[in-house]
Every structure is written in C-alpha cells, then in structure tokens.
Image (cartoon, rainbow, N blue to C red):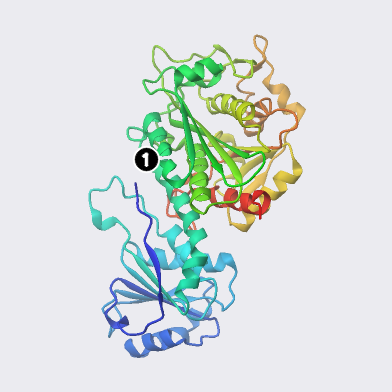
C-alpha cells in the first residue's frame, strides 16, 4: 500500500534553513508583510523573496497560490515557494495553499514556514491530499513523496488539531489506493483481506462467502459474479462509537467490469479497474471514522464481485431473484452494479436496521453525461438527509448535485416477464438506475444514492488530488457523520 506523505510539526526555528533539502515554502499575507521566517529567507536569498513579494505577479495571485524561486542563491534547496494566504483564511484557501506546496514539492522533501496565518492543520491536510502518489506498483522508490515538516509557533497545538485531519487523509489515501490497484492485484479475495486488516483500527469486520450469500438468497449479486473465477463476497465493517441505530454506507465493489456477455468496447476498458470505487469510498470512510474514534454508530457494507464473460456467465434475458424476493429480468449484463447493490442494501436493512442508508456506486455513464466530472449525482427519498449531505459536500469542497426521482422514470423499468427489468433505456439512465435501487429501500428508511461514476477517477489534476483516483466522498461523508450523527 502507498504510504501517505509523512507530515510533522516543529517549533519555528530559523537556523538551518540555508541547508534545508528539497523545497522550502513560506506563507506571506496579501499585504506582503514578511514574517521572521520570511525575512530570514529574504536575507539568505539576497533579497529575492522581498522582490518577489513586491512584484505585480504576487499581487495577482489568488489566495493559496504561489510564486516559485528556482535554485535560490544562498540556499541548498532546489526552490522556494512564496505562498499568498491571509492571516484568517477560509478552510478551502488553507487547503489550497497546502496543495500548492505539495504540487511544487513533488517527491522532494519539504520545509514549510507557517507563521503568518491560522489553520496550519488545514494547510497540512491540503498538503497530504495533494501530496499523495500511488507508488505501490513502481519499481523506483525515489518516486515516493518525501516527508514534510511544518514549522509553527505552537507545534503541539497544531499536531493535536491535525489528528482528525490526518485520519481523514488516511481514509482518502486508502480509498485512492484501492481504486488505483489493478484487477489482477485487487481481486475480490484481496479486497476482502485488506478490509479484514482494518480490524487493527478497532472496526468489527465480517466476510460472507458464496455459500452464505446463497443461503441469504442473494441471487441478484451472485448472478453478476457467475462468469468469474473470483468468488463473490459481502464484507461488513462496523464502527460502534455511539448509541442507537447506525448509519449504513453501502458500496458497489465490482473489482473489474468487462460488461459481461454485454461486452464493453475495448477502448477504455482498462479504466474499469475503478468500478469498485463505491466500495473503496465506504472503506475509506470507515477507516477514517475508526482512526479518529468517531462518536457515532456507522456500518459499512460492500458487495465484491467481478463481471466477466464465460461459459458460466449470466446472459441477457436471464431472470434472477433478489434477496428481497423480487424477480429481475436482466436485459443488459453491463448494468450489473445495481444488481449488486440491491441485495447488499436489502441485507443491510434486514441485519442492521439502520437509521438511514447511503449507497455509493460508479453506476452509470449517463451520470457523467449529465454532470461531467465535477459533481456526483445525488438521489434521495428524504429532503432533510439530502440537504445535510449536500451541505457537508459543499463544506468539504466535493461537488454534488441533486437529481430527481419520479413515477414516470420508474415506469421505464416494467417487464413483461419479471417484476422489473434492470435497465430502463437511454433516456434518464442515471435516474432509472436510482429508481431501480429505490425499489430495495424499505418504507421509512431515509436513503441517498450517490452516483460517483464521474468523480471517483479523473484524467487531470484537481486542487486536492493528482489525476487518477480522487477518494471523492470520504471527506463529505465523514463531515456528514460529524454534523448529523456524532454524539456528545
């Protein structure tokens, strides 16, 4: 697994800056007033820092952006980053500043002087998130990001404030690692093994194998995995930090999706290693909650399958029976994620009696067409829960947009041969997928469906993530738990 960039806090000390390796970053307010550390850097660089701060280029910087000095005279460092940030920045600006530092540092060591601004823990979180690199399959260890030291006036206070942020960062990194792994490594069995290892954090972890799934009647989920040599599994992770009924988080974990007999086009199929992104996010949230000892009851449940074509594979036209007892006509074997979620959602409600349920899935290309790669699709049967989630996502800077549900869309799922079809045609494809899932939500259970097809993995850098797996949803769901479910 990839190690998160090591971040530590130290008391502001100006001696030794001339010998600091890698890169040095210093925060300067928009007014251009130099802190003691910045003045020390200015002397070492023969006035270069001061000239940069007085320049028109610095004036035009947005909060959190930086000017770079390459190979400064008088220092061993390969560069100095002069980061513009107010004394009282917003959380987003502080995180952006940290991300700017991480992007500039790359895999080099980093020394950061934070004397002129508050929220050093949020700067550190931005640094940790943007400083992530998936290196587990690299043969060159030099690609691994080096450590960062953040120098502040009160390191113990900063370290204590960063503890919860570090837990979230580790949860995000865990999700990114899972989504980044190739399917020949992250099989259903290996995925389950990694989740079982989370017992070390205090989570209760239970793995159900195919014989147990058959006894439960999970015909929809098992049908998806029929064509693969990899065994289908359901993994339950429980964090018992509070009282009362838990929040249930449900994740689609298709470790590779060929489309089955309804085979996908070859071009781009390599990206289907990320079709377990929903399960990855659930795992990351559960790890974060356990690491920060959240005062809430939360259960995470993921369905792990592989969708492959073979002589044993499910066919278009097959009819399967879900755990609920409803029959489903499989029109398209590439609409498999909803079959997995249907059984896992029903099992979660039967076994855990949750106070609310949220499922996550890289479910439809239609959601990407509707919302691009900027927002996840949000579907809900409860306005209050939806509103709280959207607020949490906005607070954490994770794009989310609510889309409708309705009977007209539900009617598209009618089947002449079974209780329903697994697809409703091209019009409103993301919505009909959500309508399918809603049929497996019990009356009285507040529920949200998050279609993360467009946001789980991206092809260009974002403010807080390099291109590739983003870990979208870990921060928003952690925030939702803090704001809505934590006790005391």
Quadrant for the C terminus in the image = bottom right
- At 37% from the left and 40% from the top, the residue drawn is 181
Residue for point 31% across, 50% down: 135
Q: Position of residue 269 (x, y in %)?
A: 41, 32
Work out whether residue 154 or residue 117 is closer to the camera in this orientation and state it: 154
Residue drawn at x 49%, y 13% as measured from the top left: 315
Q: Is residue 387 visible?
A: yes
Residue 371 shown left or right of residue 116 in the figure:
right
Q: Position of residue 68 (x, y in %)?
A: 39, 75
- Find numbered disc 1 in the image and state the secondary structure of the residue it sits on: loop
Q: In the rendered image, which quarter is residue 198 located in?
A: top left
User: Closest to the observer: 99 or 232?
Assistant: 232
The x and y percentages for residue 341 are 57, 28
Q: Is residue 96 visible?
A: no
**Vertical comparison of 388 with 443: above or below:** below
Tally of numbered tags:
1
Disc 1 packing (10 Å; few <14; some 14–19; many ≥20): some
**Closest to the observer, 90 or 148:** 148
Q: Which residue is mark 1?
A: 181
Q: What x and y, as percent, mark residue 244?
A: 67, 41
């Amino acid at each position: 697994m990839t190690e998160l960039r090591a971040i530590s806090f130290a008391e502001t000390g100006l001696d030794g800056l001339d010998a600091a390796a890698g890169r040095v970053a210093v925060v300067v307010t928009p007014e251009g007033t130099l802190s003691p550390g910045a003045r020390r850097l200015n002397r070492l660089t023969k006035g270069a820092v001061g000239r940069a701060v007085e320049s028109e280029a610095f004036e035009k910087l947005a909060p959190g952006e930086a000017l770079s000095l390459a190979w400064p005279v008088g220092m061993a460092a390969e560069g100095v980053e002069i980061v513009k940030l107010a004394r009282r920045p917003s959380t987003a600006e502080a995180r952006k500043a940290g991300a700017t530092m991480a992007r500039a540092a790359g895999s080099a060591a980093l020394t950061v002087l934070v004397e002129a601004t508050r929220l050093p823990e949020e700067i550190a979180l931005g640094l940790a998130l943007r400083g992530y690199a998936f290196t587990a399959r690299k043969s060159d260890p030099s690609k691994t990001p080096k450590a960062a030291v953040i120098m502040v006036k009160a390191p113990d206070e900063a370290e204590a404030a960063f503890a919860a942020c570090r837990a979230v960062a580790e949860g995000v990194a865990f999700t990114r690692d899972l989504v980044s792994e190739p399917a020949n490594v992250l099989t259903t069995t290996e995925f389950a093994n990694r989740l079982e290892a989370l017992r070390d954090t205090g989570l209760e972890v239970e793995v159900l194998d195919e014989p147990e799934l058959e006894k439960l009647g999970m015909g929809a989920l098992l049908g998806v995995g029929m064509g693969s040599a990899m065994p289908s599994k359901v993994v339950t992770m429980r964090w018992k930090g509070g009282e009362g009924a838990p929040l249930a988080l449900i994740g689609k974990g298709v470790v590779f999706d060929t489309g089955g007999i309804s085979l996908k086009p070859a071009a781009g199929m390599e990206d289907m290693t990320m079709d377990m992104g929903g399960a990855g996010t659930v795992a990351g949230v559960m790890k974060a909650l356990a690491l920060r000892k959240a005062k809430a009851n939360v259960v995470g449940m993921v369905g792990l399958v592989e969708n492959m074509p073979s002589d044993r594979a499910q066919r278009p036209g097959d009819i399967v029976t879900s755990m609920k007892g409803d029959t489903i006509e499989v029109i398209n074997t590439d609409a498999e994620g909803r079959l997995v979620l249907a059984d896992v959602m029903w099992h979660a409600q039967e076994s855990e009696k949750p106070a609310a349920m949220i499922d996550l899935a890289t479910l439809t290309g239609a959601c990407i067409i509707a919302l691009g790669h900027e927002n996840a699709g949000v579907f809900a049967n409860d306005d209050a829960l939806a509103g709280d989630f959207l607020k949490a996502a906005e607070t954490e800077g994770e794009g989310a947009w609510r889309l409708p549900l309705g009977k007209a869309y539900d009617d598209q799922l009618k089947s002449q041969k079974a209780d329903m079809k697994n697809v409703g045609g091209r019009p409103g494809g993301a919505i009909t997928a959500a309508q399918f899932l809603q049929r497996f939500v019990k009356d009285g259970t507040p529920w949200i469906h998050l279609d993360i097809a467009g946001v789980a993995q991206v092809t260009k850098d974002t403010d807080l993530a390099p291109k590739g797996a983003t870990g979208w949803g870990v921060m928003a769901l952690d925030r939702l738990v803090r704001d809505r479910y934590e006790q005391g």
